[in-house]
Image (cartoon, helix red, strand yellow):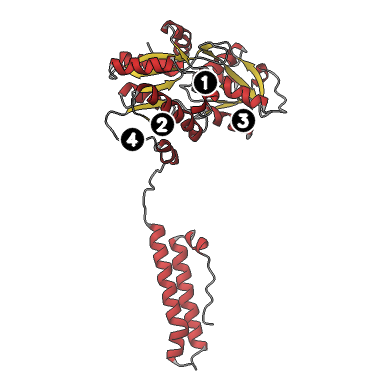
Amino acid sequence: MCFRINYHAAELRGIKTKQLLALSFRLVRNLSSVSKKDSRRSGNDIRETCIMPALIFLCFFFLISWGCTQKETPKKVSLYNKTVENAMGRARNEEDTLRFGFDLRLDPKDDVRIYNSFLEYIEKATGKDLSIKFTEKYEDTVENLGKGITHFAAVGSLSYVVGKEKYGDRIKYLVSGVNDEGEPRYEAVIFTRPGSNIQTVNDLKGKSFAFGPKMSTQGYLIPRKMLEDAGITLKDLSYYIHTDSHINTVSSVLNGECDAGGIQDVLARRLEIEGKIKVLKISDSYPSSLIAYNSTVDSKTVEAVRSALLAFEPTGRHKNMLVDWDKTEMPLGFISVNESEFYKVAVLARKYGLLTK
């Protein structure tokens, strides 16, 4: 054999240009050496056994070198958008389709399955076409609503008061979600891992903490208030992070990235029953999540959707057409409340710099 080639493709991909050149020169030297040793062999034999494979090998090297050295800006491909923008076959292009957004709660695919079945109910009740508008960033849900990119959205009470401050009457209140006790309220929960030596919220001084997005009522606003009620400010934590959903907050605590975290009550209760988390404290009640709409939606459509939501019976006659609706903060449907209910949330939002007026 003239020269043994034994490089795997994976190894070649990791080789830099200078290394490729060095290997190429080494090959040439080996060829030269072989030529001297095999000088008694005919030129044709050498060319067939050494030079031709070597030329192929060199070409292969330079092709890889060229590919590795080209500076190409990688495209940012979102698996979320690919998976969810299609929304289980619900995405439509008709101009008269109403677009619906929602704040992230669980895994994106789970959220889409939940709201996909919910929108099917609204379509049947109103005769309107609806499609899901998914966003990866929590705060984009209310931004899209204010800009008219979406027509309706399920948002937390913090997102609503922040959106109202920024967009004014372009964002309007429709209905509020009802919890499993029949009230338009929800709580936040501070939790840790099972087996942790942390027993109370007071033990979290000097520990790490996982919040949800800054626009999350149950994931950030209320847990921060709970910590302060225990005499713990952000500076008293060893560090803290913001995740993009409640389920990712849970993951960050269970995988050891943080000592404790704050999430919504519905998810916390389910995980506690399953033995996956240890609840440290449940907050006071705050106004529940709600459905809001953009002011460009005509009044006839608004009233049709409002009527459908108020007639919604997720544990009764509409139960079989829904998917995991009991995992939302609105397990018993919707009612209308006075918007003054959101004042409590606005006070905290202003205290933490989320409202400027």
Taking the image as shown, residue 220 lies to the left or right of residue 167, namely right
Residue drawn where x is 47% and y is 84% of the image:
49
Instruction: Pinpoint residue 32: horizontal percent, then vertical percent.
Output: 47, 82
* Badge 4 vs badge 1, beta-carbon distance below 8 Å: no
Q: Earlier in the sequence, mark 4 or mark 1?
A: 4
Instruction: Pinpoint residue 26: horizontal percent, then vertical percent.
Output: 49, 73
Determine whether the residue tagged by mark 2 lies in a helix, strand or loop. loop
In this view of the protein, can residue 355 be seen by the observer? no
In the picture, the disc for residue 253 is 3
Q: Which dot, 1 or 2, sits closer to the camera?
A: 2
Determine whether the residue tagged by mark 3 lies in a helix, strand or loop. helix
The kind of residue tagged 1 is Tyr
* Badge 2 vs badge 3, beta-carbon distance below 8 Å: no
The kind of residue tagged 3 is Val
Determine whether the residue tagged by mark 1 lies in a helix, strand or loop. helix
Point out the image quarter for the N terminus. Answer: bottom right
Along the line of sight, the residue nearer the viewer: 119 or 132: 119
Q: Earlier in the sequence, mark 4 or mark 2?
A: 4
Q: Which residue is mark 4?
A: 92
Q: Which residue is mark 2?
A: 135
Point out the image quarter for the C terminus. Answer: top left
In this view of the protein, can residue 32 be seen by the observer? yes
Q: Residues within 10 Å of mark 1 (few under 14, many from 20)?
A: many
